[in-house]
């Protein structure tokens, strides 16, 4: 959830007068999403640089992965064939470790966490792409993303979600054409155009269900325009 506005901020005094250098900052959690080939990678690093230039500490991370254990699970997930329930459970197992070891501690320190994918990817890929039961995914989401301090929060804040999710949306054919020149495809990148249509629909559903959290970025544009859209979305949300 959003931090309440402090009275000092509302009075628009120069922040140097009201905020000592070591004032605790509110953590900020941003995720990047989209089908493979959407082109989010370069923007993730650029956004991290923007926050660092503002003096924020940034944790750049990714899913599946982000911890030694979760990176091991990533190797299995991206290379080994497995049944959809097994795939969903390993995605959430990796997410649990990532949240506990990296994301929650960084947010508690008031840092900026930028993750290349988070839980929406599970709803899009395992839910949309594989057609796996969304009710089961929602149950797992509730368990895995339960906030460390449940009592002090209400409503949707009981489940950890990004403050802002930048969804890089583009047609699967365009994304596939971009991927064709890239490195050796992994298990997901080898999937059909139809699979990625379903993944895209999965993202669209998540976006519709939580429009305040999502910014849809039209990813089928020149890079500078995509970057402008990313910056606009971030400044609107933070
Ligand atoms: P990706 O983030 O695209 O990394 P890279 O650019 O190095 O290939 O790869 C992660 C893959 O895992 C991607 O194809 C999407 C898939 N994935 C899921 O299926 N479910 C999930 O919950 C997550 C986080 C990723």
Image: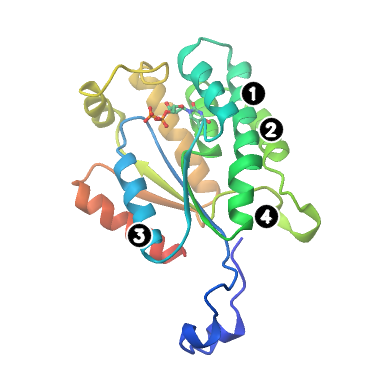
Check if mark 2's residue and mark 1's residue have beta carbons within 8 Å. Answer: yes
* Side of 167 where 155 appears, left or right: right
Could you tell me which quadrant the N terminus lies in? Answer: bottom right
Quote the CA–CA distance across marks 3 and 4.
27 Å
Q: In the rendered image, which residue does mark 2 sit on?
A: 140
Mark 3 to mark 1: distance in Å? Answer: 35 Å
The residue labelled by disc 4 is 157
**Disc 3 designates what residue?**
50
In terms of secondary structure, where does tag 4 sit?
A: helix
In the rendered view, tell whether residue 66 sits above or below residue 216.
above
Dot placed on the residue nearer the N-terminal end, 2 or 1: 1
Q: Residue furthest right?
A: 151
Marks 2 and 3, how far apart at CA: 34 Å
In the image as oriented, which residue stretches furthest toward the top?
81
Sequence-first tag of 3 and 4: 3
Q: Which colouring convention does the figure follow?
A: rainbow
Judging depth in this view, the residue of 107 and 197 nearest the camera is 107
């Amino acid at each position: 959830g959003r931090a309440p506005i402090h009275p000092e901020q509302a009075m628009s005094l120069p922040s140097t007068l009201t905020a000592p250098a070591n004032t605790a900052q509110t953590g900020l959690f941003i995720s990047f999403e989209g089908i493979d080939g959407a082109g989010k990678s370069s923007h993730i690093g650029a956004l991290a640089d923007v926050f660092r230039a503002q003096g924020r500490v940034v944790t750049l991370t990714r899913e599946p992965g982000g911890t030694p254990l979760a990176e091991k699970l990533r190797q299995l997930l991206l290379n080994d064939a497995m049944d959809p329930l097994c795939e969903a459970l390993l995605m959430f197992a990796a997410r649990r470790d990532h949240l506990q070891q990296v994301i929650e501690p960084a947010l508690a320190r008031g840092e900026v966490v930028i993750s290349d994918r988070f839980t929406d990817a599970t709803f899009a890929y395992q839910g949309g792409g594989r057609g796996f039961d969304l009710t089961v995914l929602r149950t797992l989401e509730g368990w895995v993303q339960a906030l460390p301090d449940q009592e002090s929060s209400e409503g949707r804040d009981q489940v950890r979600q990004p403050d802002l999710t930048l969804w890089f949306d583009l047609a699967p054919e365009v994304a596939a054409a971009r991927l064709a020149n890239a490195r050796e495809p992994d298990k997901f990148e080898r999937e059909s155009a139809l699979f990625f249509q379903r993944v895209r629909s999965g993202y669209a559903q998540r976006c519709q269900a939580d429009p305040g959290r999502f910014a849809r970025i039209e990813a089928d544009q020149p890079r500078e325009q995509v970057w402008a859209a990313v910056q606009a979305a971030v400044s609107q949300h933070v």
